[in-house]
Image (cartoon, grey):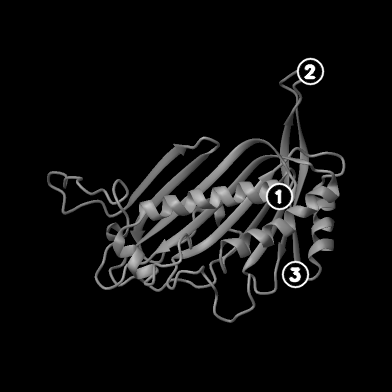
Amino acid sequence: MTSDTAPRRGQWAHAPLAFVLAQVRFLPNAAATPEYLRDAILKRTATRFPTISQTNGLNIEINLDGDPSVQRTAQATAYDLVNTEIDAMVRIQQGALTYAVTSYVDSPHFREAWLDITDALADIQVTTVTRLGLRYVDFLVPQHGQRPEDYVNAPWNLRGMPTLPGAAGGPDLHVSMVDIAYPVGRMRLQFMRGFGVPSLPMDLQGMLSPRQRPAQPESGECGVIDSDRWIDGEHRADRATLSQIFTQMHTDVSSAFRAMITPLALREWDPEATRGNNQ
């Protein structure tokens, strides 16, 4: 997102943000192959993504028109476009376009960079998307004698959970997930706590590594907040429509994050706490 030597992690002074991802999915057509989309993005972004890597895999196709037991495999090609700083990448797959960053100025800056990429969908005759997603991952590293539970509200902090008879204390490892419906789409909020240096969820590993690795927490304990907002259904793929939807999804994620964290977390991560929705 920026060429500064110090990575940016949002407008908050001590933002815990480590990874941001946006994605759209669409129905492929003859012109919407990964190769054509790759070329369209590179034409629009010039030298922004100088590193290009290709991966090949296999897709299993089931013939539903004839004998459903007849299966065939087809090669699936994907491309990763990575910038010079290795803090932003585009992943192009059959029917999916993803943008991920580990250096983050603010949400409008991220959204405009993402929309510059999605503009290439029109070049390959994609006018409709079938799913839109926005995901944030925050690394929670307690300091000053705090614990991960001090940074999140119930039910994530397990407040009120009794110590089990005979146990030495409360849980050392804990994963909490809630899946919430919105008027349009859903959000999944996860809180994971454990020991050592936090890392990205398994399904995000292999993309970008966080540029600023958190230090070993003083207490040895750490946490990860994973906020995933998505909307299914057919939506126009023009810039104005995508901008409106992604702005709303960001508002939802930011509001959920603020509701999830404690006043202590807000004070430590955003001491000024005067700029509104900065997540």
Look at the picture and state if 219 lies above or below 41. below
Asked whether residue 259 is in view, the answer is yes
Report the Cα–Cα distance between label 3 and label 2: 46 Å
The answer to whether one can see residue 79 in this image is no
Reading the image, the residue beneath label 1 is 240
Residue type at the position of mark 2 = Gly
Q: Position of residue 277 (x, y in %)?
A: 47, 59
Picture disc at residue 156? none
* Nearer to us: label 3 or label 2: 3
The residue sitting at 50% across, 73% down in the picture is 212
Q: Mark 2 and mark 3 in contact (Cβ < 8 Å)?
A: no
Mark 2 sits on what residue? 66
Q: Position of residue 152 (x, y in %)?
A: 32, 55
Residue 178, quarter of picture: top left
The three-letter amino acid code for the residue at tag 3 is: Arg
Mark toward the viewer: 1 or 3: 1
> Which of disc 3 and disc 1 is earlier in sequence?
3
- Disc 1 to disc 3, C-alpha distance: 23 Å
Name the residue that disc number 3 marks.
48
27 sits left or right of 144 in the view: right
